Image: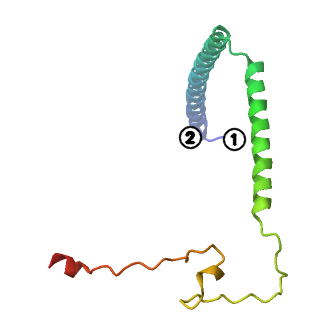
Amino acid sequence: MTSAPDSEAWPLRFGLQLKGLGELTETLTLRLLEMEARVLHLEDQQCRLLDRAGRDGVDSAAVLDLLEQTDDRLSRLEVLLEQSARSQEPKERPPAGAPVRPLRVLDDAVPAAELEFGAEPLFPEEGEQPFMDELIA
């Protein structure tokens, strides 16, 4: 059998649970109404955009055609870039374990005709420039 305090607490707990359920239902209903308003607003925007696209003569097929043309151009550019990269690679690569040639030091004793880049020296000799202190004085 139930005691007197338990029998009095049951209707109070039931009332609190019903109140909580009512608040939850109210909150969900308000959120549902907000979502419906958002959906209606988005549908309205979509209709206006489609109407404007129809008036401006923009066709989805034309847009898809432009996208395909752009894709073709990008593919051609990629092929050209790959060909360019291949043509700029050295013709002969030394084997993986081959010794590396030491750098040759160029000095004044080397005639200009022996230079690989032409008859002019790589770094022409410039005249002596005065220091900052000499310019002020």
SS of the residue at dot 1? loop
Give the residue at x 59% y 21%.
38
In the image, taking residue 55 as reference, residue 123 lies left or right, namely left
Q: Quadrant of the C terminus?
A: bottom left
Give the residue at x 60% y 29%.
21
SS of the residue at dot 2? helix
**Disc marking residue 80:** none
Per the image, the residue denoted by label 1 is 1
**Disc marking residue 5:** 2
C-alpha distance separating marks 2 and 1: 12 Å
Report which quarter residue 59 is drawn in.
top right
Give the residue at x 62% y 15%.
49
Q: Amino acid at mark 1?
A: Met
Q: Which colour scheme appears in the figure?
A: rainbow
Q: Position of residue 47 (x, y in %)?
A: 65, 12
Foreground mark, 2 or 1?
A: 2
In the image, taking residue 44 as reference, residue 102 lies left or right, namely right
- 20 or 129, nearer to the observer: 129
Q: Quadrant of the N terminus?
A: top right
Q: Amino acid at mark 2?
A: Pro
